[in-house]
């Protein structure tokens, strides 16, 4: 039986749950998983072959995103490689699958183990997506319009700056160290799989990944906790639209009260999940009329798979990338988290609830997502 190890970088819950969902798709394999335990109390029973592995503190991760500075230092990455090698030596997998565990590009090569990374296609250097400037220091100093122009001009240099620790890491371990952009660092592997639908990118399914392989789009990896519906669910009024609010573990702090204040003055029913109190989205979404999330791909695809349009209140670049694609497809609205006010959000919610075309487009995308059969595509890629 082939042995597969899945390693998640637990800076956000989404990376962990994506690995958890993929692990359940591997019937016929001996499956091992590894991640930092910080989210374990939220995700239910762990797989039998689980290992703990260190991830940098979440506060450091979110601070770096807010400032637009590199996430990892050289010392972080060296520690990661040391931990990775010990894990790989203990498990001895035939293949290791990483979700944002970027050190595996070095660790797996040193261990002589094939490495597959699961990521989003907007990070591919071969699939160009316009990058909206996030709410970083640049926009706070110069505003969005000028900030966008400066962001576009500085992107090549900034991308190389963010990739510098990864170049240094490869040189330290005697591996080739080309002039990597951060997109290269995010997608380097023996095989790169995109947890997306190609249709959002106007790309063919067989678009090449950074390694020259084709068929990299495997479809969204969906996960929802197996927990009860919230108390009073059956008594919720049926004559008002239900808005499901789920800002995830990477949404801007303090945002949920603002969102709930905005919804309190509208004729809607609001049901909200938090990173500490998860709800069974797969049971709530069929009744919802609209989803409000953080714009990240996990929440976006969860909403679209149920045929529900989404408002994405974005904070970091990854969320801006993902939500800009949904907005371009006509199934959602990108909202800047750093500039949000309750009145502005109420206006967006009113427009969204009245927009039948967005609901129709979301339902079309639900059909596209259902046709991907992600688990089967993932198994085929590994085989």
Image (cartoon, grey):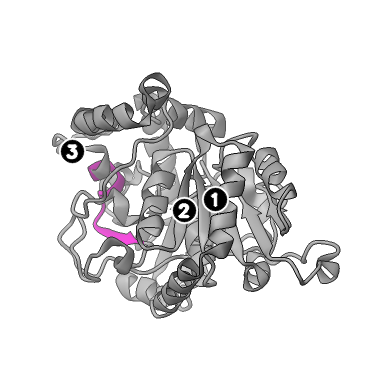
Q: Is residue 38 left or right of residue 330?
A: right
Proximity of marks 2 and 1: CB atoms separated by less than 8 Å: yes
Disc sitting over residue 175 in the figure: 3
The reply to whether residue 249 is in sight is no
Q: Is residue 315 left or right of residue 292?
A: left
Q: Between tags 2 and 3, which lies in front?
A: 2
Disc sitting over residue 333 in the figure: 2
Position in image of residue 172 (x %, y %): 24, 29
Give the class, few, some or many, for how many residues have Cα within 10 Å of label 1's Cα (few <14, many ≥20).
Answer: some
Mark 2 or 3, nearer chain start: 3
Position in image of residue 162 (x %, y %): 29, 30
Q: Secondary structure at mark 1?
A: helix
Q: Between tags 3 and 1, which lies in front?
A: 1
Q: Compute the Cα span from label 3 to label 1.
A: 50 Å
Residue interval drawn in magenta: 184-194
Disc sitting over residue 348 in the figure: 1
Identity of the residue drawn at 33% across and 61% down: 194
* Image quarter of the N terminus: bottom left
């Amino acid at each position: 039986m082939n042995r597969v190890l899945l390693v998640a970088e637990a800076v956000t819950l989404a990376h962990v749950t994506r690995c958890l969902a993929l692990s359940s798709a591997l019937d016929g394999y001996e499956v091992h998983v590894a991640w930092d335990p910080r989210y374990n109390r939220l995700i239910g029973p762990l797989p039998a072959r689980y290992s703990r592995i260190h991830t940098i503190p979440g506060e450091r991760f979110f601070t770096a995103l807010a400032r637009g500075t590199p996430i990892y230092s050289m010392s972080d990455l060296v520690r990661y490689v040391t931990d990775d090698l010990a894990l790989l030596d203990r498990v001895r997998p035939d293949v290791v699958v990483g979700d944002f565990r970027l050190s595996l590009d070095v660790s797996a090569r040193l261990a002589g183990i094939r490495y597959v990374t699961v990521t989003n296609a907007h990070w591919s250097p071969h699939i160009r997506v316009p990058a909206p400037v996030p709410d970083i220091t640049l926009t706070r100093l110069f505003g969005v319009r000028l900030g966008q122009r400066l962001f576009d001009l500085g992107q090549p240099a900034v991308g190389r700056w963010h990739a510098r620790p990864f170049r240094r890491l490869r040189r330290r371990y005697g591996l080739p160290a080309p002039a990597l952009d951060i997109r290269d660092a995010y997608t380097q592997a023996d095989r790169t799989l995109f947890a997306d639908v190609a249709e959002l990118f106007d790309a063919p399914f067989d678009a090449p990944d950074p390694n020259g392989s084709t068929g990299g789009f495997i479809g969204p990896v969906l996960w929802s906790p197996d927990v009860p519906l919230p108390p009073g669910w059956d008594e919720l009024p049926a004559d008002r639209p239900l808005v499901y609010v789920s800002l995830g573990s990477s949404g801007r702090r303090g945002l949920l009260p603002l969102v709930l204040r905005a919804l309190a003055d509208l004729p809607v029913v609001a049901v909200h999940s938090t990173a500490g109190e998860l709800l069974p989205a797969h049971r709530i979404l069929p009744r919802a009329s609209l989803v409000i999330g953080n714009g990240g791909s996990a929440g976006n695809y969860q909403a679209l798979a149920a045929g529900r349009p989404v408002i994405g209140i974005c904070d970091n670049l990854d969320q801006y990338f993902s939500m800009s694609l949904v907005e371009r497809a006509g199934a959602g609205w990108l909202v800047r988290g750093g500039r949000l006010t309750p009145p502005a959000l109420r206006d967006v919610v009113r427009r969204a609830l009245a927009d039948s075309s967005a609901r129709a487009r979301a339902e079309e995308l639900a059909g596209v997502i259902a046709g991907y059969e992600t688990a089967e595509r993932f198994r085929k890629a590994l085989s």
